Image: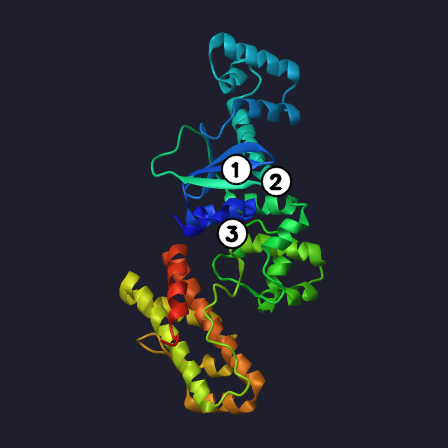
Amino acid sequence: MDDWIASEEFARAPVARVLAEIWRQGQSGSLYIKADGVPKCLSFERGALILDSASFEEKGFLRFLLTTGAADLITLTRVEEHAQKNDVSALRALIETSLFEPERLWALLESHAREEALSLFLAHGHECEFHIRTGPPARVLVGAIDIPNLLLDGVRRMKDDTVLYGSLPADGDIVRRLPTFSPDAFRLSFTERYVLGLLDTAKTLAELREASDVGEAETRRALFALLCLGLAGTAGPKPKTGKLPPDMSLAGMDRLLGTFNAKCSFVFRYISKEIGPVAFSIVEKALDEVRGRLDPAFQGAELKPDGRLEIKSLLKVNANIVGDGCRRSFLRSMDEVLVAEVLAVKRTLGPAHESALVRGLDKVGEAP
């Protein structure tokens, strides 16, 4: 289990982020939430929401039938009397009293499970605790409720802008579209697709808000949904090559490229250790995905067998003498390459390996 799920930050994180992390890690277990003073339990199997005997409450379901108009109070009273008299469950009594056919009842059970989860998106002052499960779940009533579409529905319902604003990057942080998933895998709204399109070119949050025509509130809401799904992300955890000195000499550029290539080699060695010779093609594919938006000096760079990028010396000199704008483009491209390679590790090996890799990268190039 990822360290974040066991952290204090997780305990108070927005429910959308909590569910997104359980889904991304494919966790199985029980999420206990105390929201607005009321304890609730949600069950998961391999990252999907399920309704099992551990998370199902008969009284809560009967209340759901009443509030949604699926059944009236007189009928439900008759059902409860039947259950007590015959010593059967409320679900069985709902069928034996001919109130529902099994297919209709199980459709209502799924709707109930979804609504129980969605109601938590509006909670205030909640605390979460996740208990991982290694064995099979308890008796499953409804299985494999899709988390991504649940996330989208929940974020669209959120009314407390302070929760949204507090969960987004800072105004100066760079946000970009991530190649982790195809957007066609999710039921994105027109607004969410529009905001995702704006991120084809990386922007700070402030620049995104200024560029968007759907207004600040809806832009923030759509971005939060995209961040939860992993379709968008900040440049972090971003393995930075270093800050731009006010006057960078040719020697300074060489040192910077040396640190950059040391980081590239570190990534390559890490992934090679885990998956062997196929690592080269994984890294090469990651580089090709971003090559078209890199500085011209990097577009023709060659990936060497040890993971370094070979850049022609003439282009290095030109980058050094043209001016600050070109040097900044050079630095952005270095960060772009490293972010792409880290994401490739995440896609191939999982979030835990991504975190370990970034921790290691932070130490590469540090002064002894």
Picture quadrant of residue 281: bottom left
Q: Which residue is mark 2?
A: 123
In front: mark 3 or mark 1? 1
Q: Residue at x 55, y 65 (%)?
A: 176
Q: Which residue is mark 3?
A: 185
Q: CA distance from mark 3 to mark 1?
A: 29 Å
Q: CA distance from mark 3 to mark 2?
A: 28 Å
Dot 3 crowding, Cα within 10 Å, few <14, some 14–19, many 20+: few
Q: Tell me the SS state at disc 2.
A: loop
Question: Are circles 3 and 1 on residues that touch, CB within 8 Å?
Answer: no
Please state which amino acid type lies under the numbered disc 3. Answer: Ala
Of pointers 3 and 2, the one earlier in the residue sequence = 2
Please state which amino acid type lies under the numbered disc 1. Answer: Ile
Q: Which residue is mark 1?
A: 33
Q: Nearer the viewer, residue 164 or 298?
A: 164
Of pointers 3 and 1, the one earlier in the residue sequence = 1
Please state which amino acid type lies under the numbered disc 2. Answer: Ala
